[in-house]
Image (spheres, helix red, strand yellow):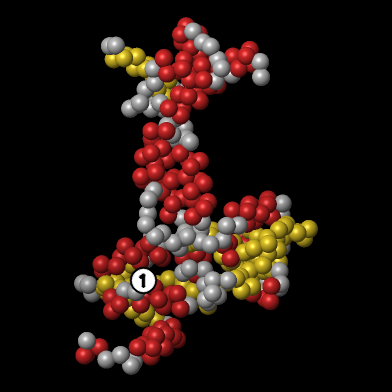
């Protein structure tokens, strides 16, 4: 490239240098800017750089001049993302179960480029979380993209669905045959991504773990099930399903100790009605999907929570507890 061509890039090199190397705690000097340009094969006088800095300000870059007596420097103040916002993004990526370790590292490195090299070190310290569990499926990002393609193009998608064996290998459901469904939405529950889709054969809305889908692609078939999806309140349904497991939806009455109000509102939503039941308890009615996951949620509170009605759900809960207890009947807890 001719030297004159390098000169045309001077403004861009200055902007990039400021964005990468300067912040409020680390302003760069005019000498550092000149030396950086020289390394790029660009000769520049101080006056022309002053003009370039002013042009960048007019362009919208928030360049602040530091005048501390003998020290003169410049730094980029307001950025698209502030450091606390970047920390939040990085921690969200690090804590996301569905993002693999490999992709987590890649995304964090990209987020770091939005800060100065000095602030990027703070981001690296921010995100270290020991032994955080991550998904093993690297293709999840392409799955999400392909699902959105199906939604935007109003087309059905096909995919294979698997679960892991004890050897940590994939075992495909339906003997490896393709699932063909109409995709409508992606939802997040308990740190997992789920596809919300209409199954034409079953005639119902179903959920699929995105990280357990593979060989996904759009088809030429137009989606169906639009009426079924539009009649579905996703926020309400997600609360009812308790972890996206299937089961029968039933109106139940539950009784809790007063200290559990926050936990109940977190799970059932703030629109449920709480009714005082004596001085220490309250009751609540809610439509839930009766499943082992629902029973596990209630059981997690021990004697502080109880299913009161209907009778068939109470009996199902009792049977669930007995089936679990049978696994520990041989243990003598009195001789511990």
Residue 271 visible: no
Q: Residue furthest bottom?
A: 330
In the image, is residue 56 above or below residue 255? above
Above or below: residue 81 compared with residue 66 = below
Measuring 41% from the left and 65% from the top, which residue is drawn there?
268
Position above or below: 77 against 169 = above
Q: Position of residue 244 (x, y in %)?
A: 52, 68
Question: Which quarter of the picture shows residue 216?
Answer: bottom right
- Position above or below: 326 against 63: below
Mark 1 nearby-residue class (10 Å; few <14, some 14–19, many ≥20): some
The quadrant the C terminus occupies is bottom left
Which residue is label 1 attached to? 284
Q: Quadrant of the N terminus?
A: top right
The percent position of residue 193, horizontal first and vertical second, equals 53, 60
Between 271 and 151, the one lying in front of the other is 151
Closer to us: 281 or 76: 76
Say which residue appears at 43% left-offset and 75% top-offset: 294
> In this rendering, would 75 be left or right of 231?
left
Q: Secondary structure at mark 1?
A: strand
Q: Pick the residue in front: 248 or 213.
A: 213
Residue 72 % position (x, y): 34, 14
Q: Position of residue 178 (x, y in %)?
A: 71, 69
Q: How many marks?
A: 1
Using residue 282 as the reference point, say whether residue 164 is left or right of it. right
Report whether residue 100 is seen: yes
In the picture, measured across the screen, residue 190 lies left or right of residue 175, that is left
Residue at image coords 43%, 27%: 21
Residue shown at 40% from the left, 26% from the top? 22
């Amino acid at each position: 490239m001719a030297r004159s061509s390098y000169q045309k890039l001077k403004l861009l090199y200055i902007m990039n240098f400021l964005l990468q190397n300067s912040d409020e705690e680390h302003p760069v000097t005019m000498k550092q800017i000149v030396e950086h340009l020289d390394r790029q094969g660009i000769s520049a006088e101080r006056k022309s750089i002053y003009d370039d800095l002013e042009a960048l300000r007019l362009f919208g870059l928030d360049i602040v001049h530091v005048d501390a007596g003998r020290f003169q420097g410049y730094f980029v103040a307001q950025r698209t993302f502030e450091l606390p916002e970047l920390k939040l993004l990085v921690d969200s990526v690090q804590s996301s179960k569905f993002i693999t370790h490999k992709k987590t590292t890649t995304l964090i490195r990209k987020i770091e480029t939005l800060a100065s090299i000095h602030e990027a070190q703070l981001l690296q310290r921010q995100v270290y979380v020991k032994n955080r569990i991550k998904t093993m499926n690297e293709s999840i990002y392409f799955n999400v993209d392909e699902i959105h393609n199906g939604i935007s193009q109003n087309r059905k998608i096909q995919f294979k669905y698997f679960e892991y064996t004890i050897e940590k290998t994939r075992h495909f459901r339906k003997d490896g045959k393709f699932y063909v469904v109409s995709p409508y939405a992606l939802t997040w529950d308990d740190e997992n991504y789920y596809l919300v889709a209409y199954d034409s054969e079953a005639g119902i809305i179903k959920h699929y773990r995105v990280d357990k889908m593979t060989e996904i692609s759009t088809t030429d078939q137009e989606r169906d099930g639009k009426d079924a999806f539009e009649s579905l309140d996703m926020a309400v349904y997600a609360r009812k399903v308790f972890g996206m497991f299937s089961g029968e939806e039933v109106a139940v009455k539950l009784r809790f100790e007063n200290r559990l109000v926050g936990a109940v509102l977190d799970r059932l939503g703030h629109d449920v009605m709480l009714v005082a039941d004596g001085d220490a308890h309250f009751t609540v009615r809610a439509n839930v999907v009766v499943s082992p996951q629902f029973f596990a949620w209630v059981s997690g509170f021990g004697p502080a929570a109880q299913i009161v009605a209907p009778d068939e759900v109470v009996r199902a809960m009792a049977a669930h507890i007995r089936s679990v207890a049978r696994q520990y009947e041989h243990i003598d807890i009195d001789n511990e």
